[in-house]
């Protein structure tokens, strides 16, 4: 129950951190908030030779406006800061609504926005939400930088496209188009536990009240987040009637997700939850889109 | 043996300087290196909340931080709250409302609640239950703890 020895670096600039990652490659792990990594170190499920701690890089802690009413967040921005930030509440109400549901207050004091994404837990709220919001992630290495859409960042269980010498430094979230609605619903055995199933939804209506855009991203029902594209496709150009919503929710739950069974819930039960949550979340999101 | 680092940290108003291995958890540093055993260690993976301390004004799990990360920071532990002769109002309320049974989880509850009550002097029951959602108590069933917090809020307002 104590971490194995490791070499420790606490750089104060991104450039220094990138130099350490370039030197140590797969032997190094990046330490952000540590609320997932340190339990793994304590259990010795992870025994990296080197830890590169980002907590002293002040340039990675910020929330700021992006052009066209979007948002930019430094990867190390604490979840607690995101939870209480007025600009986030105004420009990304879906994130504002989700933040208090993440783990516990003590975890959010330390946990970071970027750390949650880079850890890529399939039950992480921010993973699903960043895809639903069409977020983009800025990855840097000594060789340069690249922007990756959140939808392409996650490749499986605790796995992302990050190369061993790359660092997630920033997240850009575009503003929701006018006449958009959102919802985030999850079901847990106990409040704040990892959910048995959850879904993040973003929809946009055109001026005839037909669905112009829909995104439906599930958590805890696959090896990674599940972006239910076929269900979203079924809604495009349609008037979002209860029947259309029900059909899309059924499509997603029967054909697009791949839940597993564990002590908390069977795959079959997770599929049932996903269907019900998708229906409720789409209904709420379309209601909100009509209202605003 | 990995490298050693010097850590200078202020705990309950006293500045300490120690040399530590980077893998030393902050919870173990407080208990073993500083002898402040009021901070309890339960699960060591961030579930039970027994090791909660106030770090730069915010509640954190001391088992999910390394001592080396506390260099230059301010910590408040249960030893900094009150003394047996002069309890903090929150401690008084836990005593009076029977919020303590075996007491193992109590320091973690107190340290989660101090910043909460400072930021929210008129909490609802729902807000109290949210604030303690990251702390496990296997004795009380939480009802007496919630009542203790309600009592503490009154005491701390006056």
Image: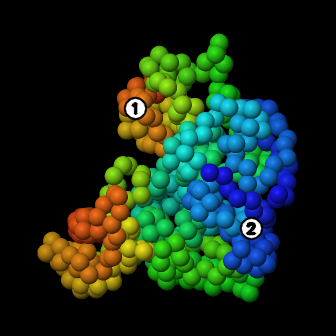
Image label count: 2
x 30%, y 80%: residue: A256
**Residue A200 position within the rendered picture, expressed as x and y whole percent measured from the top left:** 36, 68
Q: In this view, does A65 lie above or below B122?
A: below
Instruction: Measuring from the top left, give residue B10's x and y in whole percent.
Output: 78, 38
Q: Which quadrant of the figure has residue B60?
A: top right
Placement of A63 over or under A253, stated as above or below: above
Residue at 40%, 25% (x, y): give it.
B144
**Residue A210 vertical position relative to residue B121 in the rendered view, above or below:** below
Chain designation of label 2: A
Q: Nearer the viewer, residue A260 or A244?
A: A260
B126 left or right, relative to B89: left
SS of the residue under disc 1: loop
Give whichever of A288, A154 is nearer the camera: A154
Q: Which residue is labeled 2 in the image?
A: A50
> Residue A244 is drawn in which quadrant?
bottom left
Q: Mark 1 points at which residue?
A: B142
Front position in the image: B95 or A60: B95
Question: Residue B72 location, x and y as percent?
Answer: 79, 47
Q: Residue at x 38, y 67 (%)?
A: A220
CA distance for labels 2 and 1: 41 Å
């Amino acid at each position: 129950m104590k971490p194995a020895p490791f070499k420790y670096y606490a750089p104060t600039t991104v450039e220094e951190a990138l130099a350490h990652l370039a030197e140590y490659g797969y032997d190094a792990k990046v330490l952000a908030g540590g609320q997932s990594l340190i339990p793994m170190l304590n259990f010795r499920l992870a025994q990296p030779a080197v830890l590169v701690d980002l907590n002293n890089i002040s340039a990675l802690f910020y929330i700021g406006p992006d052009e066209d009413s979007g948002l930019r967040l430094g990867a190390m921005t604490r979840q607690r800061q995101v939870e209480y930030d007025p600009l986030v509440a105004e420009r990304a109400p879906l994130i504002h609504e989700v933040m208090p549901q993440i783990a516990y207050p003590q975890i959010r004091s330390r946990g970071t926005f970027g750390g949650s994404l880079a850890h890529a837990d399939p039950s992480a709220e921010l993973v699903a939400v960043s895809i639903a919001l069409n977020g983009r992630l800025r990855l840097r290495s000594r060789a340069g930088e690249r922007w990756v859409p959140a939808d392409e960042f996650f490749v499986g269980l605790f796995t992302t496209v990050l190369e061993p010498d790359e660092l997630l430094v920033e997240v850009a979230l575009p503003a929701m188009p006018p006449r958009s609605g959102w919802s985030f619903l999850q079901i847990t055995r106990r409040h704040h536990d990892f959910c048995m199933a959850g879904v993040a939804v973003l929809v946009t209506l055109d001026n005839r009240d037909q669905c112009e855009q829909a995104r439906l991203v599930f958590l805890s029902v696959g090896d990674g987040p599940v972006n239910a594209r076929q269900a979203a496709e079924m809604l495009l150009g349609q008037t979002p009637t209860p029947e259309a919503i029900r059909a899309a929710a059924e499509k997603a739950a029967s054909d697009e997700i791949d839940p597993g069974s564990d002590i908390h819930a069977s795959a079959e039960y997770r599929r049932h939850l996903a269907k019900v949550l998708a229906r409720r979340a789409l209904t709420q999101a379309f209601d909100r889109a009509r209202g605003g | 043996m990995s490298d050693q680092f010097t850590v200078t940290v202020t705990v309950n108003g006293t500045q300490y300087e120690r040399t530590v291995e980077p893998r030393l958890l902050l919870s173990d540093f407080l208990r073993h290196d500083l002898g402040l055993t009021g901070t309890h260690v339960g699960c060591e993976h961030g579930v039970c909340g027994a090791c909660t301390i106030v770090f730069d004004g915010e509640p954190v799990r001391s088992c999910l931080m390394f001592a080396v990360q506390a260099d230059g920071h301010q910590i408040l532990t249960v030893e900094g709250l009150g003394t047996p002769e002069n309890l903090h109002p929150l401690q008084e309320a836990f005593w009076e409302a029977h919020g303590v049974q075996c007491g193992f989880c109590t320091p973690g509850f107190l340290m989660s609640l101090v910043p909460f009550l400072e930021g929210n002097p008129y909490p609802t029951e729902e807000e109290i239950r949210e604030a303690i959602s990251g702390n496990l108590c296997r004795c009380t069933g939480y009802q007496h703890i919630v009542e203790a917090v309600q009592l503490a809020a009154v005491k701390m307002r006056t």
